[in-house]
Image: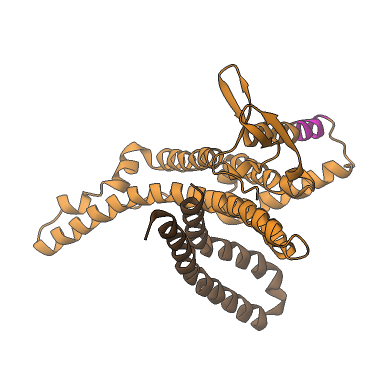
Chain colours: A brown, B orange
Amino acid sequence: MEGESLKHLAAGLAIGLGALGPGIGEGLIASKALAAIGRNPEAADKISPLMFAAMAIAESTGIYALVVALIILFS
Amino acid sequence: MNIPSLSPEILFYLGSLPISNAFFWSIVLSSIIIFIVLYISFTKKEIPGRIQSLLELFLEGLYGFTNSVTQDKKRTRILFPLIAALFLFIFICNIFPFLPGQSALQIKTQEGFVPIFRSVMSDYGMVLVLTLIAVIGIQIATLAVNGPIGYLGKFINIKKVLKAKTIGDFAYGLLDVFLGLMEIVGEFAKVLSLSFRLFGNIFAGEVLTAVMLFLMPFFAPLPFLFLGLLSAIIQAFVFATLTLVFINMGSEKIES
């Protein structure tokens, strides 16, 4: 395999495997947040922004994988 | 396909200093913010006009949020300018690219055709500088509250090793030394994670938008643009909040 095809393979693997963890993690965050809202609907205004902030942090490792894939592809 | 390059393109040179498009727009946007806020603060009225009430709404909300995290009025007064500046600057810089028509304008320089507009936070140098400001702020807060000996003692934790009387105590002491060294790694990890979160979200948003607009220009880019707008707002909030939380954690006195 020459360099170009290895690059494409590397980028695909990087983002593909990197997207597994954040997907599961954000689903867990959302499920707990929705369970809490279901138990106490008046607290929805306080829980929702915190849920979004927690999701943004859980997404971080997925974004690192994306940046690595983009760097591999485009430089 | 006009995928943005990793480093921002140079627009012109001021003497021998290259001015890139991201740098140019960071100067323009921060000047606009400074001008508006100074104007409002010099023409304050008892019954606020529209811009003044908007600013008051935003600042009061952020102040209340900062207070709820630090639980200490004095600390909030000291921290609030840094947190509010980070949030306001990153927020305005992130939503400015969503003003339509920006990717169409290009300018002819020596290297060819170069886009005039570019997201300020898609330049890793800019994001790294903001992250270093935040992390140096964390170190200053820890130093100020704990003193230099306490601050160094957080990283080189040899108290238990020196007081050890049995082999078991000595082993716990070595564990503490190892954990202290991991704290140093943790500080560098803070720099990397804070900067890559913001940079990755904004830069990857730009690349994804360019790719989607190339592949299918009608209707398909809409969810990606919406995701980009949402993540732009949320990442500004997350950056400021994480800085606040880290400074707050660092300002707790370390019990011996």
As drawn, is B128 to the left or to the right of B88? left
Name the residue at 45% across, 46% down: B191
Q: Position of residue B200 (x, y in %)?
A: 55, 52
As drawn, is B36 to the left or to the right of A17? right
Main SS of residues in magenta? helix
Quadrant (top left/top right/bottom left/bottom right) for the N terminus of chain A = bottom left
B201 w.r.t. A36: above or below: above
Q: Position of residue B219 (x, y in %)?
A: 77, 65
Q: Position of residue B129 (x, y in %)?
A: 52, 37
Name the residue at 47% across, 70% down: A21
As drawn, is B248 to the left or to the right of B92? left
Kindly give the residue lying farthest to the top in the view shown. Answer: B15
B55 w.r.t. A46: above or below: above
User: Looking at the image, can residue B97 be seen?
Assistant: yes
Q: Position of residue B134 (x, y in %)?
A: 51, 42
As drawn, is B167 to the left or to the right of B129? left
B130 w.r.t. A25: above or below: above
Between residue A1 and residue A62, name the one nearer to us: A1
As for residue B41 lying within the magenta part, the answer is yes
Magenta-highlighted residues? B35-42
User: Looking at the image, can residue B244 be seen?
Assistant: no
As for residue B48 lying within the magenta part, the answer is no
